[in-house]
Image (spheres, rainbow, N blue to C red):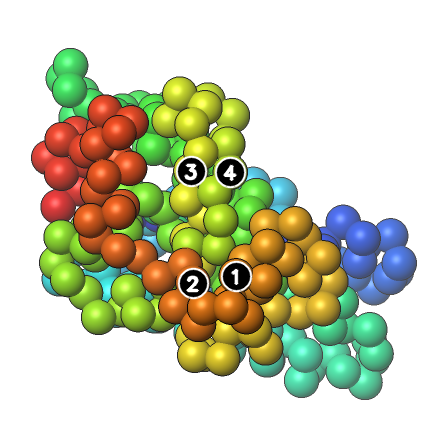
Amino acid sequence: MNYLFASFDLFNSAAYKYKNKGWFIVYKKALEEILKNTNNINEFTFWKALGDELVFKKELSVKNLCEDILKVNEVMRSIIESIYKTYKTTNPDIKQISIKTTMWIIHVDNGDTGSDYKLDINGIDDYIGKEMDTGFRISSYALRSKTILSASIINILLNNKASILNNIRIIGYSKLKGVWDNNEYPICVYFRNRNIEDSFHEPEKNINLVKEFLEKLKKDKKAGLISSSNFKEYLDYLGIKQDYDEKFV
């Protein structure tokens, strides 16, 4: 059984709390909007709250995966716009905060072949395993108003030759603690707009990963586009291609 997870996290939330006495009202409104809107996306249900982060899950439907990605990104953007409109007068610096989203897939098999496992903790479903760890690791690379996608999602999109891949770029590689035996992991970002350069906010352009990607993009407009052969070769090099093709198809 494969499960799709979607994380909505408030961006720059810690800094905003320290600067604004009325932060709680804004945060409460944002989290309520995320709950209300995400529960209406193709059978996603609320799974867990982790501070300012809300995580939703659903049984994976490969047929609906592209739509799920688009909907999660669309809901994120609509909530951001709603929050800005509601508080632009009372909170002039409201645009200091935003929302970022991350999506990943786990394969649950409580036999010996599972990469992740489902647990019942006081009547509540919980999940532990390699891909679950990966999802939370890549969420730390999530960018303002954008959606980060796991390699397991990319593998499925490649296997199905999904057109949405034209809007996804690998902006760089990074070592994630404990993931892929500490080999570099692709940071894959869904971009709604084709004008990728303008989609980054100014502070993000100082992040090394983003800065290096933008430099490559200036030289080659196709920089970061995902090639099936290159992606699969890398998985093969790491010795995980067969495992991914069996579990994430």
Whether residue 196 is visible, yes or no, is yes
Q: Secondary structure at mark 1?
A: helix
Q: Is residue 195 above or below residue 174?
A: below
Looking at the picture, which amino acid does disc 4 mark? Answer: Ser
Label 1: few (<14), some or many (≥20) within 10 Å? some
| Image point (63%, 57%), residue name | 211
Whether residue 97 is visible, yes or no, is no
Figure quadrant of residue 121:
top left
- Whole-angstrom CA distance, mark 1 to mark 3, is 18 Å
Query: Mark 3 — residue?
Result: 185
Q: Nearer the observer, disc 1 or disc 3?
A: 1
Marks 3 and 4 close (CB-CB < 8 Å): yes
Q: Is residue 242 left or right of residue 206?
A: left
Say whether disc 4 or disc 2 marks the residue closer to the N-terminus.
4
Query: Mark 1 — residue?
Result: 216
Marks 4 and 2 close (CB-CB < 8 Å): no
The residue lying toward the viewer, choosing from 81 and 184, is 184
Looking at the picture, which amino acid does disc 1 mark? Answer: Lys
Query: Mark 4 — residue?
Result: 174
Figure quadrant of residue 128:
top left
Q: Secondary structure at mark 4?
A: strand
Q: Is residue 132 left or right of residue 139?
A: left
| Image point (26%, 35%), residue name | 235
- Whole-angstrom CA distance, mark 4 to mark 1, is 17 Å
Say whether disc 3 or disc 2 marks the residue closer to the N-terminus.
3
Query: Mark 2 — residue?
Result: 223
| Image point (65%, 49%), residue name | 208
